[in-house]
Amino acid sequence: MSSTEFDDPSHEPLPLDDDLRAALARLGYEFQAEFLGIAVRTRDEDPNLISDLANALTRVGRFEEGLALDRRVVELDPDCPIARYNLACSLSLTGALDASLDELARAVDLGYCDYESARTDPDLEAVRARPEFADLFGRAS
């Protein structure tokens, strides 16, 4: 296959079943976590890099490791609403629902305004069932 065939928008990608697609996605996140883990060793003060690593670890189910890194990002940049939101997601995934709600409130107070994402983010599924979640985003809208 020539490189021009890859660039052709009419070229259909290979059909993949959902299980294979999920396995490939997981493999990609595992590779990303390994690669970013190496980079973080030399740039351990870079909140963006650490946040990317936390996300990759979370995507492969390593929630506690992702949580520890999200805490580190908040230490480095405590006034970043996205860092607080990501920490809330990790806390929700690890069952710390009160702490997750506290971090969501801090994110909103710092200017987080993507309420639709918060209402649909699968990482917040556990905390969304709490009445405080609705109160928080009702207050913020």
Image: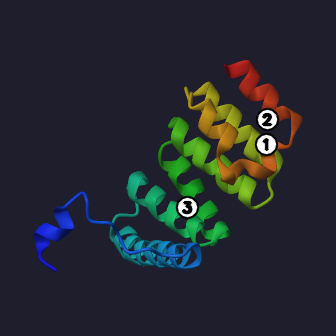
Q: Residue at x 12, y 72 (%)?
A: 3
Can residue 78 be spotted in the picture?
no
Question: How far is the residue under mark 1 from the one under mark 3?
Answer: 23 Å
Q: Residue at x 52, y 62 (%)?
A: 54
Question: How far is the residue under mark 2 from the one under mark 1?
Answer: 6 Å
Residues at discs 1 and 3 in contact (Cβ within 8 Å): no
Residue 4 horizontal/vertical position (percent): 11, 67
Residues at discs 2 and 1 in contact (Cβ within 8 Å): yes
**Residue type beneath disc 3:** Leu
**Residue type beneath disc 2:** Phe
Q: Is residue 53 left or right of residue 38?
A: right
Mark toward the start of the polypeptide (2 vs 3): 3
Question: How far is the residue under mark 2 from the one under mark 3?
Answer: 24 Å
Q: Residue at x 57, y 72 (%)?
A: 18
Q: Quadrant of residue 50?
A: bottom left
Q: How is the protein colored in the picture?
A: rainbow
- Could you classify mark 2 by the number of other residues whose Cα lies within 10 Å: few (under 14), some (14-19), or many (20 or more)? many
View extreme (right): residue: 131
User: Which marked residue is nearer to the observer: mark 2 or mark 3?
Assistant: 2
Which part of the image, by quadrant, shows the C terminus?
A: top right
Q: How many marks?
A: 3
